[in-house]
Amino acid sequence: MKVSDLDLDSQSINFLHSEGLSELYPPQAECIEKGLFDDKKSFLISIPTASGKTLIAMLAILSHISKHKTKVVYLSPLRALASEKFEEFKKLEKLGLDRKIKVAISTGDSNSSDNKLDDADVIILTNETMDANMAFERDWIYEIGLVISDEIHLIGDSTRGPTLEMILTRLVTGFLGKTPPKIIGLSATISNSNELAEWLKCELVESEWRPVPLVEAVYSNHTIMTSQDSEYSEGNLNEKRESRHTKPAIGLGLETIENGDQCLIFTMTRKSSVATATEAGINVVKTLVENQKKELQKISKKILPKDNEDETKLIKKLADTVKNGAAFHHAGLDQRCRTIIETEFRNGHIKLLTSTPTLAAGVNLPARRVVIPSVMRYTQNGLDKISILEYKQMCGRAGRPQYDNEGESILIAKGSPYDFIEHYIDGEPEPLESQILEEDSSLRIHLLSLIKTSSVFDPISKEKISKFFSHTFGGYQIDDDDNLEEKISKQLKKLKEYDMIIGEDSFKPTKFGEKVFWLRIDPKTAFEITGYIENYVQGAKHTFGVLHMITNLPEFYPQIPYDINEIIIKNEHEKLYTEQKFQDDNCFKSLLILHHWIDAMTFSDMSNNFDAEPGDIFYMQQNAGQLAYAVREIARYWKNQILVDELDIIRKRIRYGVPEKYLELVEIKNVGRVRAKNLYHAGLRTRQSLKDVSLENLSKIDKIGVTIAKSIKSQLENSKK
């Protein structure tokens, strides 16, 4: 099917042509034939990675915005994916329709309000942000006409699934009015797609078609086997492979590179990701010509931070590895480094990339060959095998539409290769199962949310609550209605115990319940925080006690035990509440890292002393900041102004990573934690002292310079302080 034949206005056709699109892939054409442009038809589209799901979304958006003034919402499970889609859909602003099209993005936490969304036509959101906006009933959500849910199979994920399920349930049951918006769910292969489509009342489009055919194979005993091979096929083996490398994953990667292609190796841990890339790079560099090496030298320099204090062991290792044409990618790297690696791998400069499995569900980085050295990975329950669904996600990265006529995925077998072929290659992904009724904390959050939003005028009856949850995917899948009632009754009882709701057969939130609803945390956590605040230690500082409490909350992750006896002894006087005990089994590495972070320890020292890398620190800082806000709001609700004031200071310290004495300086734009430290040690400790010092003397201070000095002076002159 040609783009020029689509039932779209001429502006949209011209836009698609300007993007280099002239003909649709078969799954895209099937969607059109089945009524993608029909406003009354919703769709579940289950097709392989790289088969054109984004263009299907784009076509649906073009059709919608050319006919309607209602908004389009594009949901993504990850911030990185949301940012990627925003860049893609931002191009729609070039459209010459009867109005200027606006594309906006919001991936912040539930406490942020983004006014740009009110007048946007296309809005990119994470699932969590959409859930918050729906729960808080922002005005613009009643103007939605089309919702596109990317990676919809994550409805079966124990952590992300319940939030997505609540969003979709609200949409399907008419939460946004009498006319529910059109829904388009996008996913790779789902084994029980019929069930999901029936629940969503969607037209199902399924296809195994890929623009680049995928060959899935197993490597065993120096031989590559596919499910078509009835016995070891030495014909598939280039003799050189045996001597390329002692580690099969690296050998298979090197073979790919020698053939002029790129390889992606999924390692099960961060440590093995770094080790594999480093070791492979020693051989990769031998395949490169001089111009390629020079380009990699430039990329290596770009990776190193400008300030030595920000240079960590990991970043230095990455910069060195990149010089050889290899790289690693995992959550320990900060966003700046990850973006450089992703860009340069796409550009073809980095030949071999190792990554933890999180990349499989993340940004789009295809390679000619994907290698999976092990099916084992560490989970919260210890070492476990990956699911078939995860395996298929990793395989999906093999094959670059612009460059390859075939993609290869190779799983390295430890044991009988036939078992691996039967289970993973020929196996069907596990059916999606709702998690909404399985996780108590999630069910409590969503129950409280439903009661708050549905009892504006009158209390909501238990019967209505049960009816709503019977419309969830979990309610659809559950065989026993009594089981559904039992799960809901149990958590309603808990919410009453926590003083979040009142009523017997009908319920409405208490004032405290309303406060917890706005905070979007588990009511049980809020109840426990209340207990801590009621028993707080008066007349003392509580900084260490607050950090200790936050890192012990179930919402905080990761919780890795760590011996910090020396620091405990030093900060024992900073207990938050009378029964608080600082013991080894509840003092985690994250507590140690946060403790030093707010004392301005450099990234370099954090890395050297605690193996804490910028990506980890950023995640902990964000997580701790959100929880500190929740604690602050609960303290404010209970009118504990002393704690509120102290928590305001702690939140700022978590945000900026500085001691309290630097706060006045660090809040000035362009004065980060390093410059604040330098200014303070130069005797410039207040805004007034910065006003009084001459521009010349200010610019001489390390890391300041003339440009920053002028900026500081300008801000202080314009401020009311």
Image: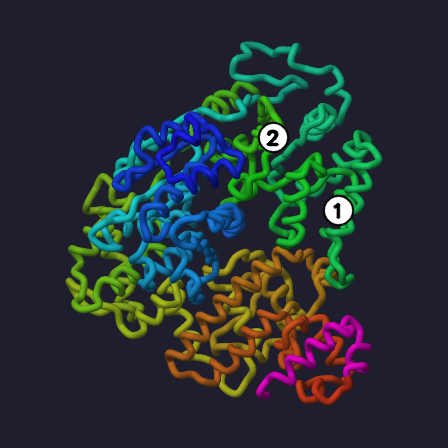
For numbered disc 2, what is the local secondary structure?
strand
Main structural element of the magenta stretch: helix, strand or loop? Answer: helix
> Are dots 2 and 1 in contact, CB under 8 Å?
no
Is residue 720 covered in magenta?
yes
Residue that numbered label 2 is attached to: 370
Q: Nearer the viewer, residue 510 or 352?
A: 352
* Cα–Cα span, label 2 and label 1: 24 Å
Is 117 in the magenta? no
Residue type indicated by callout 1: Ile
Number of other residues with Cα within 10 Å of mark 1, as a class: few under 14, some 14 to 19, many 20 or more = some
- Mark closer to the chain start, 2 or 1: 1
Residue 11 in the image, given as x and y percentages of width and height: 43, 42
Q: Which residues are magenta?
A: 695-721
For residue 316, side relative to residue 406 (left or right): right
Q: Residue 578, position in %: x, y?
A: 48, 78
Rendered residue at 39%/61% (across/down): 119
Residue labelled with disc 1: 299
Residue 566 shown left or right of residue 528 in the figure: right
Is there any visible trace of residue 545 in the rendered image? yes
Residue at image coords 66%, 68%: 596
Q: Quarter of the image holding residue 695? A: bottom right
Q: How is colour applied across the structure in the image?
A: rainbow
